[in-house]
Amino acid sequence: MQFDAALAAQDTFRRAEAELGSDWDTAVELESTFSSNAGSTAREAYEALLALGVRHPQAYSFQAFCIFITWQQVTEETIAHHFQTGLRLCESFLVSPDGKHPKDVEQITELYGSYRDGLGLDEEDETLVEFRKDTPKGGD
């Protein structure tokens, strides 16, 4: 990636204040817990941040923040679940770039590829490669 996801998360989080309204204080508390802990405490704060994002689907900066912190979860605990969560969040975010910060769209598009790569979605398995070799080319 051509950017630091942790720095991008900080940037988008600052911009999310206006989007979250009365939930801003909750978001600040959860982000502080997520950033200053590890293990189950950080994971619980992370899950609560994602749940807050679900409650604010039009909070585009906060949605971007959730995508970036999901990458932090991937680096902390490299499991398919985090890659799948990141992929789902990216797809939802990228459906329409309208009203979204152009830098977020660019970075999330790049991160989307990383989530796909982590799940092996851009690689063909050996069976598919062999199938392509054995499939006749051309007409009837």
Image: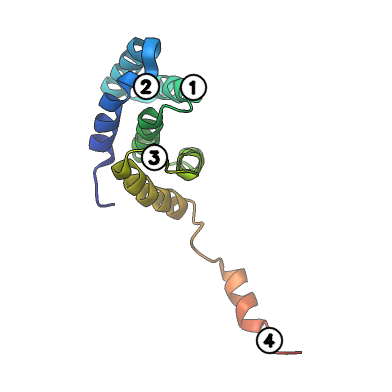
| Residue 77 x, y percent position in the rendering | 39, 37
Question: Residue 19 — which label?
Answer: 2
Q: CA distance from mark 4 to mark 1?
A: 50 Å
Q: Nearer the viewer, mark 1 or mark 2?
A: 2
**Would you place residue 67 above or below residue 45 in this image?**
below
Q: Amino acid at mark 4?
A: Pro
Residue 124 in which image quadrant: bottom right
> Which coloring applies here?
rainbow
Q: Of the numbered discs in the image, which one, if any, rests on residue 74?
A: 3
Q: CA distance from mark 4 to mark 2?
A: 55 Å
Q: Secondary structure at mark 3?
A: helix
Residue 51, labelled with which disc?
1
Spatial CA distance of label 2 from label 3 is 26 Å
Disc 3 or 4, which lies upstream in sequence?
3
Q: At x 42% / y 43%, what residue is drawn?
A: 97
Q: CA distance from mark 3 to mark 4?
A: 41 Å
Who comes first in sequence, dot 2 or dot 3?
Answer: 2
Q: Which residue is mark 4?
A: 136
Of 75 and 109, which appears nearest the observer?
A: 109
Amino acid under label 3?
Answer: Val
The reply, left or right, for residue 20 in relation to residue 14 is: right
Q: Residue furthest right?
A: 140
Q: Position of residue 52 (x, y in %)?
A: 45, 20
- Distance in Å between CA atoms under marks 1 and 2: 15 Å
Amino acid of disc 2: Glu
Amino acid type of the residue tagged 1 in the rendering: Ala
